[in-house]
Image (cartoon, helix red, strand yellow):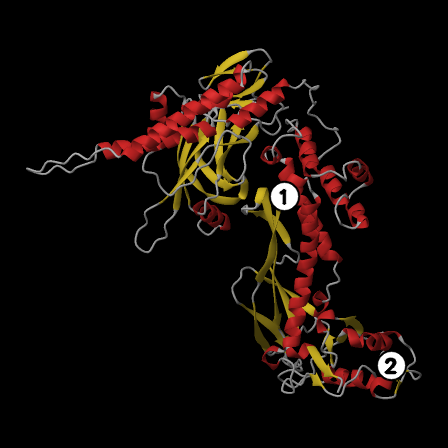
Amino acid sequence: MPPKEFRLTAGAVEWSDIEAAAGETKLRKFKMTAYTGVPMSLYGYYHPVVVDLATLKASKQVRIFHDHRTDRLLGHAKNVEITDKRVTAEGVLTNDRSMYVREITDTSRNGTTWQASVGVRLTKAPEFICEGQKTAVNGRSIKGPAYIARAGELYEISFVVFGADSATSAAVAASRKESNMDFDKWLTARGLNPDELGEGNRAAQQLIYDAEIKAKKTETPEVTPAPKIKAKETPVEADSIAEVRSLKAAELSRQAAIEDACKNHTAIAAKAIGEGWSVEKAQLEVVRASRPVAPAVIQSADARTNEKVIECAMRLGSEEKQDVVEEAYDEKTLDLAAKHRKMGLKGLVDLCCRMEGRTVPGLNDSTEDWVRAAFSTAAVPNVLSNTANKMMHDAFKTVPITATRFARKLTVNDFKTNTGVNMNYSGVMEKVGGAGELKHGDLSDDTFTVYAETYGEMIGISRKAWINDDLGAFTAIPVRLGRKAARTLEYTFWTLVKANTGSFFSSDNSNVATAAPIDATGYGKATQILGEMKDANGVPILATPKYIAVPPALQSSALGMYKSQNLAVTGAGSTRKLEGGTNIYQGLYEPFMIRDLAGTDGYWYLFADPSDIAAFGIAYLRGNETPVVEDAPLQSDMLGRAWRGYFDFGVCQIDEQGAVMCCTT
């Protein structure tokens, strides 16, 4: 059964600023043509859909979203007008704190074209028009097979990057001297239908229109009347008239050349002239039309193929380890995905189009045709986004991160500098007297500062990748991003430990052991220092030693202390070795080789259990301990869609009594 809720993309977006009172922020308002009444290819429908504008109603408040995401509210429409030919809307972006409002406005100023996509909810099932039948809707004659959506409700409008309607464009501008209505009237006066004019032909007519307006203003300049003053007549500029004539001549030459190239193909000629094609494009279409017709491609897929299967196939064909992928999916999904593991970008688009019953582009179609087909589906963006997220998370988890063992997890809700409180119960309980009176204890609250920062990179599908049909160019990125995120966390944490900011490890804090090599003597000194730590009232804090952090050069000695039963130290300097004797520290303090401590071979650290007394902390934004992938604005070298992978965290010092820095000399 066709869905009773859908979204369709069309129309142009124009911008301006709302005047604000003194001290207030200017908001952005917009105008858009959201739908022009034409048949559209929509997700869930095997045939074109036409929304009957005569029965379409707007909700009391039409909200504005980014990419139809309800968690990305941008503002609302202040005026929605539905005529028998189009849907237009005016609104304002009120959520000025939204990152998506900033992205849309900033990229629009820099020339990025956005489109409008409307969400329509049907109150009854759409009417189906069979093949060979016709019906009149929105002032047009619609041929079956097609669906007519009647009694619909327009409830939201979204800003989107790429739509399914190739005949529309979204022009963004701060202001315009002449309105589209003036241009449409001019087209109508010339016998042209603005709604049926192709994009290329419309652009050519716009040039002629602008030149005529310029010439007209030159011929009849505006003069402010004044008593006894007569305006002087200004001669017409020859260049303006010559420009108009040149444009008209070029258009007539183009039409004549197309008619000559399209002999015996009147339908192609009419379409080429009406849509503003170049002569070369018209010739190419004639060549294609002259070839033998191949059997029709059935736009369907294996009924068992779904987004999960396609996602699995992408990961099987990527550089991810196969055992990681196999662990994430059941056997049935893996079997169905195996035959698609070598697909490229076009194979992905082909599979998603077939799954949704959409038309698949031909092998000779342009890169832009494939991109347009890809993002007219719901499956392609979802599969790419979900796959990137899962691949990045799995790659992140495979990196051996040590920092999380040595630090306490903290949570911050924003990027401001936060003040943390290290709650310490000092002293001991006092004896209760005969009257049973309990005295109030002291609760010290040592503070520390912490803030989160963002680390990340962009993910996208470049034009080169589309031309080379290289899906691997995309799937390789999230794997590397996941490893980079883990590596960034590890590096940032141990950089703070080594920096010893504010003399965190110092004799004043009584947390430094000198002449403490990796042996029973050094372990004894470090353990003694940690064991003698006292609170402000002079009572031992009972810190429990748990982990040893060593540079690569000291790993073998630390492992020997942890695993060997019988050992003793003999020799000195380069002849120093462990042999014989009894190791009383066997299995006590788990050692970790820290690659970021390389170059500090004379130092190692003994840490208390961070769940008890933490020397350091890692703060995650809203508690999220893993990186994320989300939609991002397109860059100039990208086609279709882009994503950003980022990780929000920060590291800090908490309590100097939670660790001991040991110097071997």
In the image, residue 188 sits, relative to residue 501, either above or below, namely: above
The answer to which of 63 and 567 lies nearer the viewer is 567
Q: CA distance from mark 1 to mark 2?
A: 63 Å
From this view, report whether residue 364 is shown above or below residue 259.
below
Q: What quarter of the picture does the C terminus occupy?
A: bottom right
At horizontal 55% and vertical 59% (from top left) the residue drawn is 413
Residue 139 placement, left or right of 590: left
> Which one is earlier in the sequence, the residue at label 1 or at label 2?
1
Please tell me in which quadrant of the rendered image residue 559 appears: bottom right
Q: Secondary structure at mark 2?
A: loop
Res 263 quadrant in image: top right
Per the rendering, the mark at residue 584 is 2
Q: Nearer the viewer, residue 605 or 85?
A: 85
Q: Which mark is residue 464?
A: 1
Q: Residue at x 71, y 80 (%)?
A: 660
Q: Is residue 215 visible?
A: yes
Residue 349 x/y as whole percent: 66, 34
Can you give x and y, in whole percent of width and height, for residue 221 in the image?
Answer: 21, 35
Residue drawn at point x = 72 percent, y = 75 percent: 607
Q: Nearer the viewer, residue 344 or 588?
A: 344
In the picture, the quarter occupied by the N terminus is top right
- x 86%, y 76%: residue: 560
- Helix, strand or loop under label 1: helix
**Is residue 202 rendered to the left or right of residue 225?**
right
Q: Position of residue 645 (x, y in %)?
A: 62, 52
Residue type highlighted by circle 1: Lys
Within 10 Å of the Cα at label 1, are there few (<14), some (14-19), or many (20+) other Cα atoms? some
* Mark 2 neighbour class, 10 Å CA radius: few under 14, some 14 to 19, many 20 or more: some
Kind of residue at disc 2 = Ile
Q: Can residue 181 be seen?
A: no
Q: In the image, is 520 to the left or to the right of 275?
A: right
